[in-house]
Image (cartoon, helix red, strand yellow):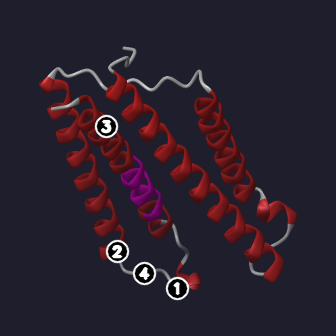
Amino acid sequence: MTPEQVNKRKSFSYAMIGAGIACLAAAYQVAFTTPKEGAPSLATGIAFTAVALALFAVAAILAYQVRKSGTPPAATDLSGPQGNAVIRLVVAGVIAMVGSYFVDYITPTDQPLGLALEVGLVIVMGVCFIAAGRMARKIRAAAAAQGVSKQ
């Protein structure tokens, strides 16, 4: 396994863990919905839980494969100007994510303004995280091409 493949598999396993946690949160919401709100069937909660367990299993298998390979991950040197841009993009994405959480306290999300704020902040968050990931990948690729990757 190459160091870049190790990074990809680690990232994918972290994404699987995050998706599993989201499925467990959805199962919790389904399990504690009051009957007057139109509670879905018990099978819905069980399905979310089963999907979460499957995602955790996939993440564990990927983590085991990465650990078994013994290949160190590719290092990303964020000390240059592009590294500073990556850090700024990640910070902006986190701020947008936190801001989307607090939109409900500013204005209800069932109103057009609240919905627009929520959607806008989620889009900003996604764009920032995707751009930061791509820039970091380019930094790692350039370092690997020059043969000066720090570990």
Single out the mark in the foreground, 1 or 3: 3
Task: Determine which residue is flagged by label 3.
Answer: 10
Q: Upstream in the sequence, badge 2 or badge 3?
A: 3
- Whole-angstrom CA distance, mark 3 to mark 4, is 35 Å
What SS does tag 3 mark? helix
The dot on residue 44 is 2
Q: State yes or no: discs 4 and 2 in contact (Cβ < 8 Å).
A: yes
- The amino acid sitting under disc 2 is Thr
Q: CA distance from mark 2 to mark 3?
A: 30 Å
Magenta region: 18-26
**Amino acid identity at mark 4:** Pro
* Disc 1/disc 2 C-alpha distance (Å): 13 Å
Residue underneath mark 4: 40
Q: Quadrant of residue 61?
A: top left
Q: Secondary structure at mark 1?
A: loop
Q: Are marks 4 and 1 in contact (CB under 8 Å)?
A: yes
Single out the mark in the foreground, 3 or 4: 3
Residue 74 visible in the picture: no
Q: Position of residue 122 (x, y in %)?
A: 64, 63
The residue sitting at 36% across, 46% down in the picture is 17
Tell me where residue 39 appears, x and y as whole percent: 48, 80
Q: Nearer the viewer, residue 85 or 103?
A: 85
- For the C terminus, which image quadrant? top left
